[in-house]
Image (cartoon, rainbow, N blue to C red):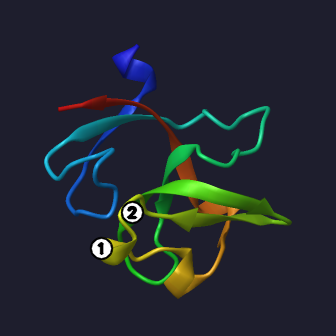
Amino acid sequence: MLRRRVRYRIDGDSMLPTLSPGDFVLVDPHGFDGRPPQPSDVLVARHPYQPTVIVKRVAEVVDGGVTLVGDNPEASSDSRSFGTITFDAIIGRVTSRIS
């Protein structure tokens, strides 16, 4: 199972209380093959303006992309500041958390 997943470390507070800094998440890079992201899915995506990846929750699926939000809005840089992201910016679906 681990060979099919990619591990990412949570660095910020934007997904508290669901994900804490220092947690690791396992991401399925093929998690959306055959189905588009759905509201409430947690995913990893490339930030549209910075050379980093982000872990966010899908708030809405729109034509050509998704609107993302953090679970902790006061500490989150999300679609409220950078708009929707395209489907091709999505790296994969978060499948589990490792504390």
Residue 28 left/right relative to 7: right
Q: Is residue 87 visible?
A: no
Helix, strand or loop for disc 1 = helix
Q: Of the residues shown, which amino acid type is indicated by label 2? A: Val
* Nearest to N terminus: mark 1 or mark 2: 2
Task: In the rendered structure, find residue 37 and report the number of the disc placed on it.
Answer: none
Percent position of residue 82, x then y: 54, 84
Q: Quadrant of residue 89?
A: bottom right
Quadrant in the picture for the N terminus? top left
Q: Of the residues shown, which amino acid type is indicated by label 1? A: Ala
Disc 2 crowd, CA 10 A, few/some/many (<14, 14-19, 20+): some
Q: Does the CB distance between marks 1 and 2 fall below 8 Å?
A: no
Percent position of residue 12, x then y: 22, 63
The residue carrying mark 1 is 75
Residue at 17% in and 32% down: 99
Helix, strand or loop for disc 2 = strand
- In the rendered view, would you say 80 is above or below 28? below
Percent position of residue 87, x then y: 70, 59
Residue 55 left/right relative to 11: right
